[in-house]
Image: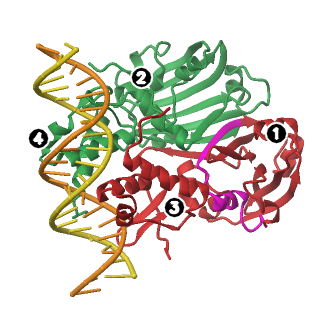
Chain colours: A red, B green, C yellow, D orange
DNA sequence: TCTAATTTGTACGTATGTATG
DNA sequence: ACATACATACGTACAAATTAG
């Protein structure tokens, strides 16, 4: 039903979020200024200001006085989700990142997989399996499935250059994620790939991500329990912005 | 140095956050209305509105048109931190919660502990050790230290009635937290307390919480890997408010 | 049911300051 | 010096929700 219309600042926000989600506005691109929004939509400048200011607070935009408002790049988005690219994580610790690709293919999903990814069993999906290293020591086994329509060129990418996570974020900012963290005893093959001693535990992160309410990826990420920790900060600490980017 | 003064709406926000953090304003208590803030501080109503509105968005306050603005209760705060009381978690799944207390005492910290908790080695601190059960099956071993000054009556509490987490939140909303999640092989004693099979992994959460920039608790939470998962949602899903509370 | 008072929510208009190019 | 763009602040107005009488 929804007879009632949303407030104008909210309509403006959703208009812009939609453009970001659909890819019409890409990371680092300029969004209309407050005054442009005034001319375009007829709202007052304070209303346009509120829309852009709140989008900034929510991490969708980066704004700078005298410059303009820009769509956040995927780093900021991943910060929003507390999900960082593993390569960034490693290099930010001052270590050397490397990777080995075990599989990169287009496959038919199993029954379980087609159910989880909410697709027809006859639609092919991408599968990537790779190990990520920090200073030549394995720290993550990535086993990920990607919906074909979302990233048609997934199979052609060189994932030793850009991680799947970073590549997917570059296509379109992911706007929803769910992850489950658990501790497991790894299978023999996983244990070997991660060069773990027998009977040592694994930290397993199972993650789904959505774009515009459509599930686009499903992945399992295995970490050696004694070589990896998942860190979370909550509270005012979060309120730090990095930036120092060039625009245009 | 900070010659430059903060914007007035920000000063107002910090004024109110300080009162919440210090306990001068407790959960569910009324905060001054916009018009009262106008009279008290001389700002315009829109400035007072912005301060209260942002505190609402950040989860510090619950506002209702026609009623007023109130400090969020600890449930909302824990939502902010993504840290729920284990008892709530269990009962919200429809299971029965119970617990066994192993230790509840005032102790002298070890060297490591006094360093971690940033206190003098001669100051006593509280120690609680207990097991939490879901339908009589152990799901968490809690091993927590609490600074004495923060909760002087900690030792007298009946933690079979209220969990340490809920009790601490009731004293003062925690406004900062850090947690590290890892997978470990539990020691024999932990493995027995959690009724785990030999060599099964544990999910270990090590958590520190602060109030007003002062570390008040440090705890380790052990979960059987096959009976516990840590769930995180990120994105627009988070934007749900429950409420239905009585005010006055 | 009606009215009035209070409180929040939204919207507009205006003004001034600061940062950038 | 000037134009552009964001940041803050004040003032006003009306609407919607709630409570008190």
Which x, y percent locates residue B187?
70, 30
Would you place residue A70 above or below residue A110 in this image? below
Which x, y percent locates residue B165?
47, 26
Would you place residue B22 above or below residue A69 in this image? above
Task: From the image, state whether disc 3 or disc 2 is nearer to you.
Answer: 3
Q: Residues within 10 Å of mark 4 (few under 14, many from 20)?
A: few
Q: Which residue in the protein does label 1 denote?
A: A114
Task: From the image, state whether disc 2 or disc 4 is nearer to you.
Answer: 4
* Gap in angstroms between the C-alphas marked 3 and 2: 40 Å
Q: Which residue in the protein does label 3 denote?
A: A72
Q: Residues within 10 Å of mark 3 (few under 14, many from 20)?
A: many
Specify whether residue A90 is in view.
Answer: no
Residue found at x 45% / y 59%? A241
Which x, y percent locates residue B19?
26, 37
Magenta stretch: give its range: A158-182
Residue B122: in magenta span: no
Q: Which residue in the protein does label 2 denote?
A: B167
Task: From the image, state whether disc 4 or disc 1 is nearer to you.
Answer: 1
Which x, y percent locates residue B167?
42, 22
């Amino acid at each position: 039903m929804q007879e009632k219309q949303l407030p104008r600042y909210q309509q403006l926000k959703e208009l812009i979020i939609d453009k970001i989600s659909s890819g019409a506005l890409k990371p680092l691109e300029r969004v209309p200024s407050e005054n442009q929004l005034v001319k375009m939509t007829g709202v007052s400048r304070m209303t346009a200001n509120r829309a852009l200011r709140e989008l900034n607070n929510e991490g969708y935009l980066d704004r700078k006085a005298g410059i303009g408002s820009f769509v956040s790049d995927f780093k900021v988005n991943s910060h929003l989700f507390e999900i960082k690219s593993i390569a960034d994580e490693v290099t930010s610790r001052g270590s050397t990142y490397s990777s080995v690709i075990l599989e990169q293919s287009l496959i038919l999903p199993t029954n379980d997989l087609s159910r989880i990814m909410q697709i027809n069993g006859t639609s092919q999906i991408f599968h990537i399996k790779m190990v990520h290293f920090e200073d030549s020591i394995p720290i993550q086994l990535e086993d990920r499935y990607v919906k074909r329509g979302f990233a048609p060129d997934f199979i052609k990418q060189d994932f030793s250059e850009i991680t799947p996570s970073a590549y997917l974020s570059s296509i379109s900012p992911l706007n929803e994620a769910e992850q489950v963290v658990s501790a497991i005893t790894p299978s023999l093959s996983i244990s070997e790939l991660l060069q773990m001693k027998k009977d040592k535990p694994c930290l397993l992160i199972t993650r789904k991500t959505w774009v515009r309410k459509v599930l686009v990826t499903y992945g399992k990420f295995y970490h050696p329990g004694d070589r990896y920790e998942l860190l979370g900060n909550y509270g005012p600490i979060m309120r730090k912005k990095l930036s120092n980017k060039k625009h245009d």
